[in-house]
Image (spheres, rainbow, N blue to C red):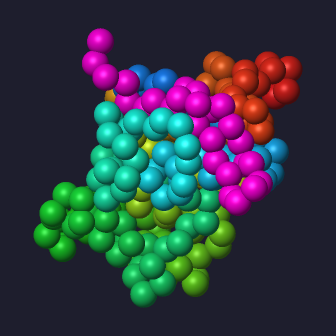
Amino acid sequence: MSEPAVILDNVAVSFGETSVFRDVSLTLQRGDVAVVVGESGVGKSTLLRAIAGQGPFTGTIKVAGKHPKEIETDFHVVLVPQQPFLWDHLTALGNVALVRRITHDETSAVARESALKFLEKLEVDEIATRYPFRLSGGEQQRVSLSRGLAAEADIYLFDEITANIDPRRREQIVRLLLDLAASGKTLVIATHDRRFAHQMSKQPLELTQNGLRPLNGDEK
C-alpha cells in the first residue's frame, strides 16, 4: 500500500497555557474523506491550519509524507478557508484565473478559459466579471471554492464551505466533493452542519478537547 495521504498522531494545539485540543490521531489514504464536526471554538479551523502548515502544534503530522511546513507552499495541498478572502482588485474570473497561472503556469488566455470551467461547476460563471464587493456572501464563498478547486490539489482542507450556501447548492457541493474524492483526492472537511457531515461521510468525526470520536448517527 502506498504511503498515507495524511497522518495525525497525538496532535495537540495550545496557546500559552490554554489547551485547544489534544490526542488527535487520524490516518487517511488517497481518496478518503474525513469530516470533522464540533462546537464553535473547539478548534476545527485550528486543526486544518496545523495540517496546512499555518499554525503551531505538537505531536506528528505528515501530509503526503512531509512535515506541514514543507508543504506550506506546495499546491498539492490546498486549504479553502471559511472566509473567502478574495482578491478585491480582481473579478471573480480573475481570482480563479490567477490560481491557474500560479499552479499550472498557464498563459493569461488559457487561465481564463480554465477558470470559467471551474466557475461553471459552482454556477457562478454568470457573475464572472463582477468584483468581490458586488457579490453576496454565498457567491463569494462559491467563487472561493472554485478558486480552491482550480488548483487541482491532491489533498483538500475545507473549512465551513457551506456556511452561506442555500440547500439546493449545498446538494450540488456534496455531489461535487464526492466526485472529487472518487477521483482520488483526499478531503478533510470541517463543518458545524451535521446533515452535510453525514452526507459526506458514513462516519463523521467529532472534535473535542480530548481528541476525535465518532459522531453519533442519530445527530443528523
Q: Nearer the viewer, residue 85 or 196?
A: 85
Q: Is residue 5 above or below residue 214?
A: below
Q: Nearer the viewer, residue 92 or 181?
A: 181
Image quadrant in which the N terminus is located? top left
Give the residue at x 46% y 68%. Answer: 126
Q: Position of residue 70 (x, y in %)?
A: 31, 50
**Residue positioned most to the front:** 17
Image quadrant in which the C terminus is located? top right
Q: Position of residue 62 (x, y in %)?
A: 40, 36
Is 180 one of the magenta-colored residues? Answer: no
Range shown magenta: 1-26
The image quarter containing residue 193 is top right
The image quarter containing residue 194 is top right
Kindly tell me whether residue 57 is visible in this rendering: yes
Q: Position of residue 119 (x, y in %)?
A: 42, 59
Judged left or right of residue 40, residue 123 is left
